Image (cartoon, helix red, strand yellow):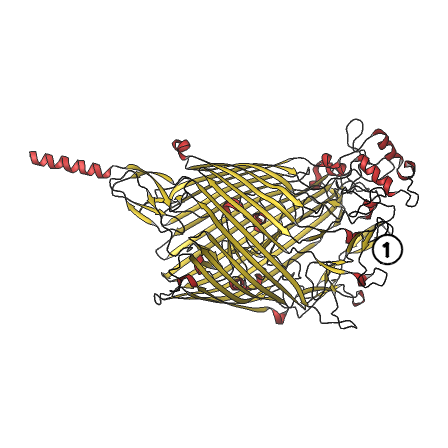
C-alpha cells in the first residue's frame, strides 16, 4: 500500500510537470544582425508571434514537449524542440535557392529565381509612405520602365501610368491592365493602400501574353492581404497630413502688374509712357489710387488636411484563414468646395472544405464622395486690380466694377455645387479542387457593380444660372457592371529530379456593361434644395448604353532542366465583340528562355556570384482599346423642335441622325510584338543585386482616328494603319552598403529610357515622295520618323536684341525684344516649312532611394528624376499676358533699359511665335519622399498586448528643382480658361500599431 501511494504521487508529479506551460523568450538573427518580422509558431497549434524590430520574441503557453517553428521568406525554416530551455536564440540561414521568394505572375505564382519574363516587384512598405488613395502615385519611381504622370491633383483624382512608352494611338490605348487578386479591375485606385500585400508589374510579352488582347501596355498585378495561420492579430494604421501649396513661380503683384501694363503700352519709338487714363479703366484707376490690390491665390487657396484610418483583423488555422479590414480616408482640397471621402470594407476568407476542395471568397465594398470646385475657376491669370468684397466684407458679383460683366470667381464658387457619389461592390468567389497534389482545377467568378451619381447645381445667382433660368441643374448616373467567369486547370507532374514541368490551361468569359443617363433641368423654384429641388423645364435627357464581351482560351507550358535551363511558351486566343464580324478573334503567342548561369559547374565555386541569369523573350499582345459599336453604323440623338402656333410654345419630338463617325466594318486588333533581353544578378554575397534589360516593341495595325472631309457626311473614321516602334533600356541596382547588427544602409538606383517612333502611316506620299503626316482628332500631328508625342512648330532662337540683323532674318518686321525663331529654309520668311518636331517625352527618368535603419530608427528617402522632357506652357504662350491685360507668370521681361535675352518685351499687339517661345524644358529633380520612423520597443507596451508600434513623419514633394514654371513640372498652370488644380507639398504624422 505504501509503495502504491508513492507510485501515485510520482505519477501525479510527472503529469503535472509535463502539463505545465511556460514563456519562451529569445532573439532571431541572420548573419548580419537581428531579424524583425520572423514568424514564431508552436507546431501543430495556432499560437504564434512575430519578432519585433530587434529580432526579439516572447511566446506564452509553451510546454517542454513543444516544438517552435521559425520561418521567414527567403530563409530556411527551422524547427527547435523546447525541452528545458527558457531562452532560445537562433540564427536563420538564407535559403540555398537564394531568391526563391514566391511572386505572383499571370494565372499563378512562381519562384522569383525561375521567372523568365520581365517582372518587377514593388516594395509595398516604401510605396505606401505616400499619403493618398491614388495607388498609381505610389508606383512612381518604384519600378524601371513604369512612368507615372500626374493626371488630376484634386482630391480623389488619379494619375496616368505608361509602361515602356506609348504603343498605341487609340484613345486610352496606353493604359496597363490592372489585375487585383487575379481579376481585372477598371481602376487601380479602387484598392485601399493598406490592404495591399504585393505589387508585381509585368512588362514584356513573355509575361503579359497570358492576358492577350488587354496586355499590350503591360500588366499591374496587385495581391491583397489574406489571413495567416497563427495567433489572431489586429493592426491599426492612422495618419494626418497637412497640405500646402507648392510652386516655382510668382505672379505680378498690384504694382508690378501696373508696371507691366504701362510697359506694354509704351511708345516703342520714343520710349515715352502713355497716360494712365489711356490704358486703365476708371475702376482700375480708382484701385490704383486706393492701392486696392488683390492676391487671388491668398483669397482662393487654403492649407488643407488629410486623415486616414485603417483597421484590420487577421487569423487562421490549418483549415480556415480570414482577413478583414475597414478603411476610412478623408481629404480636403486646398481649393474650397473640393474634398474626397472614402470608406471601404474588405473580407477575405479561405476555407478548406475537404481534403481536396478549397473555397475562397473576397468581398469589397466602397462608398466614396467627391466634391469639386466650380468650373472656370482661375486664380493664376486674373487681374489684381479688382474688388472682390464690398466695404462690409460681403462678396460682390461684378468684381471689376458695375460696368464690367465679368463675374467674381469667388461668387461662382459660393453659388455652385458639384458632388459625385460612388458605391462599389465586388464579389469574388472561387473553388479549387485538387485531384492530386499535382493536378488542380479552379473556378473563379467575379461580379462588380459600380454606381456613380453626379449632381451639379448652379444657383439663380451663379453666372451660369441667372439668365432667366432660376438655377441650372445637371444630374447624371453611370452604372458599370462586370461579370467574369474563369476555368483554370493546373498540372505540375513530377517527371524526374532533373526536369520540372508546369502546365496551365484557362477558359474565360468577361462582360462589361455601361449605362449612362443624364438629366439637365432649369427653372428651379428653391435654391436651398439644389439639384434635388423641383424644376419647371427639362433641357436635355441623353442616355447611352454600351457593352463589350471577351471570350478567351489560353495555355502555358513551363519547363526547367537541371535548374539551369528554363523555357516558357504561352498562347492565347481572344474574341472581342468590339471588332468587326470577320476580325473578332486575335491570336497572341509568346516564348521565352533563361539560363541560370550560377548553377553551372564552372560557376558554382565562384563566391562572388550569387545569381546570374540571362533571359530572352519574344511574343505578341493585343489592344482592343476602342469603344463598342465603332465598327458599326450608329445614330446620334437629334430631337426635332416644333413651334405650336395654337399654344405659342415649342414642342420637342424625338429624332436622330447618322453618327458623325463613319463605320468601318474591317476594324481589327492592334498587335504589339516585343523582343526583350535581360540579365539578373546578385554579386559579392548579395552586396549588389539588380537587373539590366533591353526591349524593342513594334505595334502594327494601329487603331487610328482620322479626320475626313465633311462632304462625305461624316467627320472622322477609325481604321487600322501604320506602325509604331518603342525601344528602351532599363536598369535596377540595389546595393546593401552596410549590414551591421544595429545599422543597415541600402542604396537603390532605377533608370529607364524609352524612344518611340512612327515607322509608317497610311503609305501616302506627297509629290516629293515624302510620307504625308496625319493629324488625329486630338490635334496631334503624326509623322513618320517622329515620336507619338511631338510638339510641331518653329524652333525658338531667343529674343531679338539691338544690333541683330533683323532685316536678314525670317521676320524682317520684328523689333528688339520680339521672339526670334529659326528660318530653317533661309528664304526670309517663317511658314510651315520652317516647323520642326520636338519630342515631348523625357530622354530618361529614374529614382534614387536610400533606406537606413539604426537601432529603432529608420529613414527612407526617395529622389525622383526626369530629364529631357518638354512641355508647352500655356500662360507664357498667351499673348494677353504680354499686353498686360491679364496676370500670370512673373518674368524679367525685356525693356530698353534692361534688355533680356530670355523673355520678350511687353507690347499692345500680339507677339508672333509665342508658341515656340513657350515650349520649355520640363526636366526636374524632386525629393519625392522623406520618412523618419521610430519603432517603439516592445517591452514598453507589452503589458497591454501590443506586439509592435511605430510612429513616423513623412514629407512628400518637399523640394523640386525645375525650370518649368508651374505648380508642378508635370502639369500646366492653367487648363483652358481655368487654373489647374495645384499639386501640394505634404507633411504627414502617422502611427502603426499591432496587437
Q: Is residue 849 above or below residue 390?
A: below
Question: Taking the image as drawn, is residue 88 in sight?
Answer: yes
* Residue depicted at x 84% and y 38%: 259
Which residue is tagged 1?
A: 805
Give the x, y percent position of residue 191.
Answer: 54, 48
- Answer left or right for 388 relative to 321: right
Q: Nearer the viewer, residue 920 or 234?
A: 920
Q: Is residue 148 above or below residue 582?
A: above
Name the quarter where the C terminus is drawn: top left
- Answer left or right for 456 relative to 213: right
Q: Quadrant of residue 482?
A: bottom right
Q: Nearer the viewer, residue 588 or 69?
A: 69
- Element at badge 1? loop
Q: Mark 1, residues whose alpha carbon is within 10 Å: few (<14), some, or many (≥20)?
A: few
- Answer left or right for 299 relative to 478: right
Please identify the residue farthest to the front as the structure is shown. 803
Please identify the residue farthest to the top as the structure is shown. 392
Give the x, y percent position of residue 661.
Answer: 73, 63
Please identify the residue farthest to the left as the structure is shown. 1
* Residue depicted at x 54% and y 47%: 849
Give the x, y percent position of residue 805.
Answer: 86, 55
Question: Taking the image as drawn, is residue 223 in sight?
Answer: no
Q: Quadrant of residue 684?
A: bottom left
Give the x, y percent position of residue 622.
Answer: 59, 65
Amino acid at each position: 500500500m505504501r509503495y502504491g501511494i508513492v507510485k501515485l504521487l510520482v505519477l501525479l508529479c510527472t503529469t503535472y510537470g509535463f502539463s505545465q506551460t511556460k514563456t519562451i523568450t529569445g532573439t532571431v538573427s541572420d548573419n548580419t544582425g537581428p531579424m524583425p518580422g520572423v514568424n514564431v509558431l508552436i507546431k501543430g497549434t495556432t499560437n504564434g508571434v512575430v519578432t519585433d524590430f530587434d529580432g526579439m520574441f516572447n511566446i506564452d503557453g509553451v510546454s517542454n514537449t513543444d516544438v517552435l517553428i521559425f520561418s521567414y521568406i527567403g530563409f530556411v525554416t527551422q524547427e527547435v524542440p523546447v525541452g528545458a530551455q527558457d531562452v532560445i536564440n537562433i540564427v536563420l540561414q538564407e535559403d540555398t535557392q537564394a531568391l526563391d521568394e514566391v511572386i505572383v505572375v499571370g494565372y499563378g505564382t512562381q519562384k522569383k529565381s525561375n521567372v523568365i519574363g520581365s517582372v518587377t516587384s514593388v516594395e509595398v512598405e516604401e510605396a505606401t509612405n505616400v499619403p493618398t488613395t491614388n495607388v498609381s502615385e505610389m508606383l512612381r519611381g518604384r519600378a524601371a520602365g513604369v512612368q507615372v504622370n500626374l493626371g488630376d491633383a484634386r482630391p480623389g483624382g488619379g494619375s496616368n501610368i505608361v509602361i515602356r512608352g506609348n504603343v498605341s494611338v487609340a484613345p486610352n490605348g496606353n493604359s496597363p491592365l490592372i489585375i487585383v487578386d487575379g481579376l481585372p479591375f477598371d481602376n487601380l485606385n479602387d484598392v485601399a493602400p493598406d490592404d495591399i500585400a504585393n505589387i508585381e508589374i509585368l512588362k514584356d510579352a513573355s509575361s503579359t501574353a497570358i492576358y492577350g488582347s488587354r496586355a499590350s501596355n503591360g500588366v499591374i498585378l496587385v495581391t491583397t492581404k489574406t489571413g495567416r495561420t497563427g495567433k489572431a492579430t489586429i493592426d491599426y494604421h492612422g495618419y494626418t497630413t497637412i497640405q500646402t501649396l507648392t510652386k516655382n513661380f510668382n505672379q505680378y503683384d498690384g504694382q508690378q502688374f501696373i508696371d507691366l501694363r504701362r510697359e506694354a503700352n509704351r511708345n516703342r519709338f520714343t520710349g515715352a509712357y502713355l497716360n494712365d487714363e489711356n490704358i486703365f479703366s476708371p475702376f482700375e484707376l480708382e484701385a490704383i489710387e486706393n492701392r486696392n490690390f488683390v492676391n487671388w491665390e491668398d483669397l482662393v487657396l487654403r492649407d488643407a488636411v488629410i486623415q486616414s484610418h485603417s483597421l484590420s483583423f487577421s487569423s487562421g488555422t490549418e483549415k480556415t484563414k480570414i482577413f478583414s479590414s475597414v478603411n476610412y480616408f478623408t481629404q480636403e482640397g486646398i481649393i474650397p468646395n473640393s474634398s474626397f471621402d472614402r470608406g471601404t470594407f474588405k473580407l477575405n476568407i479561405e476555407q478548406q472544405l475537404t481534403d481536396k476542395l478549397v473555397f475562397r471568397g473576397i468581398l469589397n465594398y466602397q462608398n466614396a464622395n467627391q466634391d469639386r470646385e466650380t468650373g472656370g475657376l482661375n486664380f493664376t491669370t486674373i487681374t489684381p486690380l479688382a474688388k472682390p468684397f464690398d466695404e462690409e466684407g460681403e462678396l460682390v458679383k461684378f468684381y471689376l466694377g458695375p460696368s464690367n460683366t465679368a463675374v467674381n470667381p469667388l461668387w461662382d464658387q459660393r453659388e455652385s455645387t458639384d458632388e459625385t457619389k460612388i458605391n462599389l461592390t465586388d464579389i469574388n468567389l472561387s473553388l479549387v479542387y485538387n485531384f492530386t497534389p499535382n493536378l488542380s482545377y479552379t473556378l473563379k467568378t467575379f461580379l462588380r457593380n459600380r454606381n456613380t451619381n453626379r449632381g451639379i447645381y448652379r444657383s439663380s445667382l451663379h453666372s451660369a444660372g441667372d439668365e432667366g433660368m432660376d438655377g441650372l441643374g445637371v444630374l447624371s448616373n453611370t452604372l458599370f457592371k462586370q461579370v467574369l467567369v474563369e476555368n483554370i486547370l493546373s498540372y505540375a507532374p513530377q517527371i524526374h529530379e532533373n526536369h520540372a514541368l508546369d502546365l496551365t490551361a484557362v477558359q474565360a468569359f468577361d462582360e462589361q456593361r455601361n449605362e449612362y443617363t443624364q438629366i439637365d433641368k432649369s427653372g428651379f423654384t428653391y435654391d436651398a434644395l439644389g439639384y434635388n429641388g423641383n424644376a419647371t423645364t427639362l433641357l436635355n435627357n441623353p442616355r447611352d448604353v454600351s457593352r463589350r464581351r471577351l471570350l478567351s482560351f489560353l495555355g502555358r507550358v513551363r519547363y526547367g532542366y537541371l535548374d539551369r535551363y528554363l523555357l516558357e511558351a504561352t498562347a492565347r486566343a481572344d474574341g472581342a465583340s468590339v471588332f468587326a464580324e470577320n476580325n473578332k478573334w486575335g491570336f497572341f503567342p509568346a516564348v521565352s528562355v533563361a539560363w541560370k548561369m550560377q548553377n553551372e559547374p564552372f560557376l558554382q565555386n565562384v563566391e562572388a556570384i550569387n545569381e546570374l541569369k540571362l533571359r530572352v523573350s519574344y511574343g505578341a499582345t493585343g489592344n482592343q482599346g476602342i469603344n463598342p459599336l465603332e465598327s458599326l453604323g450608329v445614330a446620334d440623338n437629334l430631337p426635332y423642335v416644333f413651334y405650336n402656333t395654337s399654344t405659342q410654345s415649342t414642342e420637342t419630338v424625338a429624332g436622330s441622325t447618322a453618327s458623325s463617325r463613319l463605320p468601318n466594318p474591317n476594324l481589327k486588333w492592334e498587335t504589339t510584338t516585343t523582343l526583350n533581353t535581360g540579365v539578373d544578378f546578385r554579386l559579392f554575397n548579395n552586396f549588389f543585386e539588380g537587373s539590366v534589360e533591353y526591349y524593342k516593341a513594334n505595334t502594327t495595325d494601329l487603331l487610328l482616328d482620322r479626320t475626313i472631309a465633311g462632304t462625305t457626311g461624316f467627320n472622322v473614321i477609325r481604321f487600322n494603319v501604320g506602325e509604331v516602334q518603342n525601344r528602351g533600356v532599363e536598369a535596377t541596382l540595389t546595393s546593401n552598403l552596410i549590414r551591421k547588427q544595429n545599422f543597415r544602409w541600402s542604396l537603390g538606383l532605377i533608370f529607364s529610357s524609352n524612344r518611340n517612333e512612327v515607322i509608317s502611316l497610311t503609305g501616302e506620299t506627297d509629290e516629293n515622295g515624302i510620307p504625308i503626316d496625319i493629324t488625329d482628332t486630338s490635334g496631334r500631328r503624326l509623322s513618320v520618323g517622329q515620336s507619338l508625342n511631338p510638339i510641331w512648330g518653329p524652333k525658338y532662337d531667343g529674343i531679338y536684341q539691338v544690333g541683330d540683323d533683323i532685316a536678314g532674318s525670317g521676320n524682317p518686321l520684328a523689333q528688339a525684344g520680339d521672339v526670334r525663331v529659326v528660318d530653317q529654309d533661309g528664304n526670309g520668311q517663317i511658314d510651315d516649312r520652317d516647323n520642326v518636331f520636338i519630342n515631348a517625352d523625357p530622354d530618361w527618368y529614374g529614382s534614387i532611394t536610400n533606406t537606413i535603419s539604426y537601432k529603432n530608427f529608420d529613414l527612407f528617402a526617395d529622389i525622383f528624376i526626369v530629364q529631357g522632357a518638354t512641355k508647352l506652357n500655356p500662360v507664357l504662350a498667351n499673348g494677353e499676358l504680354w499686353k498686360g491685360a491679364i496676370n500670370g507668370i512673373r518674368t524679367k521681361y525685356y525693356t530698353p533699359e534692361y534688355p533680356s535675352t530670355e523673355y520678350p518685351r511687353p507690347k499692345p499687339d500680339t507677339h508672333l511665335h509665342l508658341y515656340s517661345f513657350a515650349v520649355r524644358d520640363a526636366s526636374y529633380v524632386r525629393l519625392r519622399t522623406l520618412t523618419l520612423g521610430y519603432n517603439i520597443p516592445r517591452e514598453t507596451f507589452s503589458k497591454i498586448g501590443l506586439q509592435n508600434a511605430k510612429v513616423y513623419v513623412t514629407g512628400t514633394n518637399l523640394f523640386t528643382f525645375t525650370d518649368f514654371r508651374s505648380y508642378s513640372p508635370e502639369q500646366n498652370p492653367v487648363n483652358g480658361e481655368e487654373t489647374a488644380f495645384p499639386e501640394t507639398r505634404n507633411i504627414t504624422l502617422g502611427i502603426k500599431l499591432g496587437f
